Image (cartoon, coloured by chain):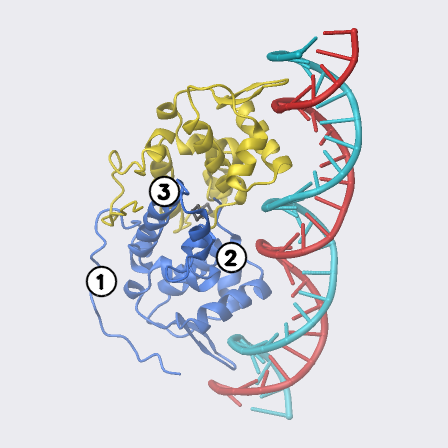
Chain colours: A yellow, B blue, C cyan, D red
Amino acid sequence: MKLSSRTEYGVRAMVELAEAHGGGPVALREVAEKQGISEKYLEQLFAALRKEGLIYSQRGAQGGYTLAKAPGEIRVGDIVRALEGPIALCDCLANEEDDAVCERMGECAAHPLWVKLQDGITSILDSTTLQDMIAGASGDSANDIRGNSEEESPNE
Amino acid sequence: MKLSSRTEYGVRAMVELAEAHGGGPVALREVAEKQGISEKYLEQLFAALRKEGLIYSQRGAQGGYTLAKAPGEIRVGDIVRALEGPIALCDCLANEEDDAVCERMGECAAHPLWVKLQDGITSILDSTTLQDMIAGASGDSANDIRGNSEEESPNE
DNA sequence: GTAAATCCTACTGATTCGGTAGGAATTATG
DNA sequence: CATAATTCCTACCGAATCAGTAGGATTTAC
Ligand code: FES
Ligand code: FES
């Protein structure tokens, strides 16, 4: 229950790109410096994000990266999936068609809970776009996760 | 975004104890066999659960483990916390009083989202009890099963 | 007394994680 | 064209975590 630095860094970097959206490409070095991330490490994250079509890269001098879509079109869940692979709490939740692992368990009482938890996580992640994040809110509008009555106020 | 086998095993084992609740103590070997978990490994998990006061152990022949509280009183979140430590997606979410890490970031746009995600996860985990799980449901309808019933005194 | 069980501490092999290293390929600019 | 800036690619590395083992000490029912 801890998000990897891959995810942390990746999301922060994407926010950075989102803020520069509309302007020219942003160099990796610039993003890395602003966010305090190792350049070489971020390079790998961007490679993954690019492979998934979330960002577009311009090679050569004055090149850099830009969002491939509008900030409002990129969900945090997309970023996470690009960096970590499909969100699957348990092996048996990875692919619905081939649930061989759970088949063996059969009466696994935990399964429904994991499904619910995974759905909850996915729902939150997919109801927040980069647009929401740079706007300061965390996308609490279109979210129907029960039990979340806490309202965080982005101060400062 | 993957739950450790510690969590998976731990919850399954606790369900096993919940099903045997009311009867005598259940030997670790029995739980391990039924759930297909390494005995020696499960031993360590039970040690953690015991230290957190979730289960009670009876040493010696015919000994074993029993839930320290009624199944309706034990939330999945309690189990997860006992096994993995406090649920903290990000370092800066670990302890609210000492958020030094985020202080440095200041304008970290991701923070509110992580808070929200963590709250969502915690909420789901804490709204499901072992009682819910052995009943077949995963607590999706009602989490008001906080019905206080009598239980034997967990001493020590 | 003995067998059944928990308890405790340490070790280990494999994998993942976070990060480095070095260079090849591409491109704007002068 | 030359050069500098920049992305792209692949491999490697140390440390940490993970899942599991090993071996024995202790407690207790019978
Ligand atoms: S075997 Fe898949 S959730 Fe239990
Ligand atoms: S620094 Fe804590 S969430 Fe960004």
| Mark with earlier residue (1, 2) | 2
Query: As shown in the figure, which amino acid type bears the numbered disc 2?
Result: Arg
* Badges 3 and 1, same chain: yes
**Dot label at residue B113:** 3
Q: Residues within 10 Å of mark 1 (few under 14, many from 20)?
A: few
Q: Nearer the viewer, residue A69 or B49?
A: A69
Query: As shown in the figure, which amino acid type bears the numbered disc 3?
Result: Leu
- Position of A38 compared to B45: left or right? right
**Dot label at residue B6:** 2
- The relative height of residue B80 versus residue A65 in the rendered view (above or below) is below
Label 2 element class: helix
Q: Where does the image place residue A71, in percent across and percent down from the top left? A: 38, 25
**Dot label at residue B146:** 1
| Mark with earlier residue (3, 1) | 3
Q: Where does the image place residue A13, in percent across and percent down from the top left? A: 49, 34
Chain bearing mark 1: B
Q: Where does the image place residue A60, in percent across and percent down from the top left? A: 64, 17
Label 3 element class: helix
Q: To which quarter of the image does residue B150 belong? A: bottom left
